[in-house]
Image: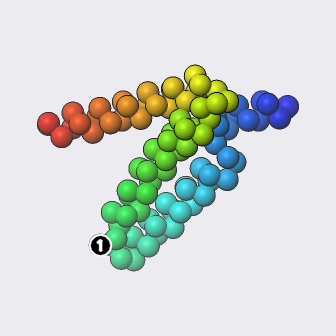
Amino acid sequence: MSAEGQKSELAGLPAWLYPAGFWLAVALLAVGVFFPDYAVVGVACVALVPVLAAVWVAFGAWKADRRLSLAALAALGGLGLVVVVKGFI
C-alpha cells in the first residue's frame, strides 16, 4: 500500500491520536468502576473522542482535503443539531 493510501485510510488523523483517546477513555472508565462518582468523566471521554477527532480532521486537513474537512464539519453540525433538539424534548 502506498503512503498516500495509508494517509487517506487514517482520514486526516495522526496514527496515534484515536488509539490514545480510546485508551485514555478506557482508563477513565476503569477508574469509574472503583470510584462511581467519577464514572461520568469516563463516559464523557468516550463521547468526546470521536468529536475531538472530527474537530482535528475539520481544521487540520483543511488545506490537504477540503471535502474531508467539510464532511467532518457537517458531522459536527449534525451532532450540534441533535444536542439542540434534544434540549427541547
Residue at 76 percent across and 35 percent down: it is 6
Looking at the image, the residue that sits furthest to the top is: 67
Indicate the position of residue 24 as horizontal and vertical percent values: 53, 63
Residue holding disc 1: 37
Residue at 55 percent across and 55 percent down: it is 22
Quadrant including the C terminus: top left
User: Which element type, helix, strand or loop, lies under badge 1?
Assistant: helix
Looking at the image, the residue that sits furthest to the bottom is: 34
Q: In this view, does 13 lie to the left or right of 73?
A: right
Q: Is residue 50 visible?
A: no
Residue at 78 percent across and 30 percent down: it is 5
Looking at the image, the residue that sits furthest to the right is: 2
Q: Is residue 39 left or right of residue 56?
A: left
* Amino acid residing under circle 1: Asp
Quadrant including the N terminus: top right
Indicate the position of residue 53 as horizontal and vertical percent values: 53, 44
Residue at 37 percent across and 31 percent down: it is 77
Indicate the position of residue 85 as horizontal and vertical percent values: 21, 33
Q: Is residue 13 above or below residue 46?
A: above
Write down the quadrant of residue 33 in the picture.
bottom left
Q: Is residue 27 above or below residue 87?
A: below
Rate crowding at label 1 as few (under 14), some (14 to 19) or many (20 or more) other CA atoms within 10 Å: few
